[in-house]
Image (tube, grey):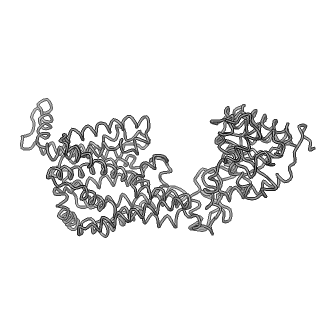
Amino acid sequence: MRGFLSRVWSRRAAREHNFHPSYRPDVDGLRALAILAVVGFHAFPGRIHGGFIGVDVFFVISGFLISSILYKSLGRGDFRFTEFYAHRIKRIFPALSVVLAASLVLGWFALLPDEFTQLGKHMAAGAGFILNFVLLREAGYFDVASELKPLMHLWSLAIEEQFYLVFPLILWGAWRLGFNLLSLVVLGALVSFGVNVVWVHAHPVWAFFLPFARFWELLAGAVLAHVVLFHRAAVGAWIRRWAFHPWVFAKPPAESKQDTVLNNTLAGLGFGLIVVSALVLRSTWLFPGGWAALPVLGACLLIWAGPAAFVNRFVLANPVVVFIGLISYPLYLWHWPLLSFLHIAVTETPSWKLRGGALALSALLATLTYFLIEKPIRFGRKTWIKTVGLCAGMILLGAAGWGLYLKKGFPERFANFDATFATAVQTFSVRSTQECRDGLGKAYTQKADGINDYTWCVSTESPDRATVAVLGDSHAYNLYHGLRANLDEQAWPLVLLGHSVCPPIVNAEKVSRCTDPDSVRTAIAFIAKTPTIRTVILASYWTLASLDHPAFQKGLEDTVQLFRQHGKRVILVKDWPELPFLPGPCAHAKLFYHLVQRSGPCTLTREAVDAQRRLYKDHFEALRKAYPETVTIFDAGAPLCDDSLCWVFKGNRLFYTDDNHLTLGGAAFVSERLIPLLQTSAPVSSAGKTP
């Protein structure tokens, strides 16, 4: 086995001779160290806490190799942009194209519409090498949600490609103008590192994803390449002079052995820095920042030490380690989508056996990709047909991803599974309409500027002709659309009013993080003064408010009193259950196994639901007892529960889009039980009697 692997990387070295005249197997071994750290972190984050530093090691290696090529080409005077980028395309595109296409196919069968829509967006951004900018507007790299993004890992490839696009142009221009390239690269690295250190405190997500804060790691490799190629003797002598100074060594080793001792020491120190960083650093720490300097320095020391150093020769240049380094790029591309799809498909954290199986499959696919796709394209006959074909294929993949995004994940794929879930995102996309806002302004103009601030303002016809008003936050928005799906809109004109994160009470700002309480008070006043509105439904994500604050009970009672004085019937909605998990994995379990067990992670006990409602349930009951003719309580969770459990599914219908919002089908299912309360309600006088 050892002999076979030795021949593999020896033949690789021979084939690459024209492009990498000084092939070093230990650098491929360093790649292996980096990919093992990354894969270990992604699969077993509780063990390899800081394995994400493998990406930083990759950046150093890329900067070193690419800069070495550029320096040599510029020195020989034969640098060509077309040749440089053709080599980059043949190196990057083949494996990436295969993984993108495979993710698309797997996503078609495995992902629900919103997940597939996001995959399409990330696929287009990944094919265009701008995914880091897209992810900048989404969750952070270390958030739990990142596990549900199969192409999340392409952010680092995007940064590398952005470096490859910019750096050769700058270097070539500086060389033509006669600038000192080393000084320029050192200056760029220092500026980028400074940006990284500042941003990691002020804007940590920027520091992680933006190239300006990451280029210093690639430029560290570029500085190292210049020193190794043109200044190794001088810099080596300077290091030896200080390392073996009499102040350090009373009896320094013989001059003939100093290089060996020094390189072994530097290689051991570099190896230790990378290993310790991978085991000790935590994703909760501010990163990259100054912490990233540890693995970057470690990688630089290992490369500087050279192939003869003990660690490089006997650890990194070991044929098995080199082989892992050879397949490190396709392994990086394959492992995360497989782990991510695994996380999406199961309802709990996948077992170590499943994760281990995913890594084994990743290694197999990476090996096949390297030998059957990457090597033939990269090292075969040099022809422009390959380059053009790879570019065309990447454009098609990007276009397919963008089309997938525009088509909202092709919801018709699951028409027999749950059509209401498939259309949930599109149906719930209209939050506020100008017609509704104009109707409010025409009917009630005391706070016209506040009216324009509504997050929710939708009506089936002019708001001043509505008979039922739904007031609240996004949960009220869910309920409104459920009612629209069940009610005759002409017989029961509806209006939805409210603001995000604002409970529907007059003093919302005292008990919540409501950013525009005036618009809530304006909505309450409008509903109270509009004579056609007979029933007011107060619905909210109540547990976001400070329910144990005395102001909550008073605000709720004052709101009910106001509506009572104007002859309105008030329906207080006890919220549906909040899930302690995301419903997506439950949907996949339903999709693939056609069975949801009566217990387990896709259900919630009634005891847990009762605990969620404990604080506001008593307030509701007190108001119902105080004003029985005015107040009715509707339990929105009852349709989703039986005597012991509450459900994510019922029959063939998925109720939830996330942990607390309903699908259109779920909202319609809940609202169907609310309609009898509307049909039996009648306006009451201020004294509480039916007129």
Task: Name which residue lies at 78% across and 53% down.
Answer: 674
Residue 180 place in picture, x, y as percent: 18, 40
Residue 649 place in picture, x, y as percent: 65, 60
From the viewer's perspective, tell me whether residue 135 is left or right of residue 71.
Answer: right
In front: 275, or 69? 69
In front: 628, or 351? 628
Is residue 360 visible to us here?
A: no
In front: 648, or 446? 446
From the viewer's perspective, tell me whether residue 401 is left or right of residue 606.
Answer: left
Task: Name which residue lies at 59% across and 67% down.
Answer: 412
Residue 353 place in picture, x, y as percent: 44, 61
**Outermost residue, top side:** 247
Task: Name which residue lies at 21% across and 57% down.
Answer: 25
Task: Indicate whether 357 appears above or below 310.
Answer: below
Task: Name which residue lies at 60% across and 52% down.
Answer: 658
Is residue 124 visible to us here?
A: yes
In front: 227, or 488? 488
- Image quadrant where one finds the N terminus: bottom left
Q: How many marks?
A: 0
Residue 636 place in picture, x, y as percent: 73, 51
- Image quadrant where one finds the C terminus: top right
Residue 656 location, quadrant: bottom right
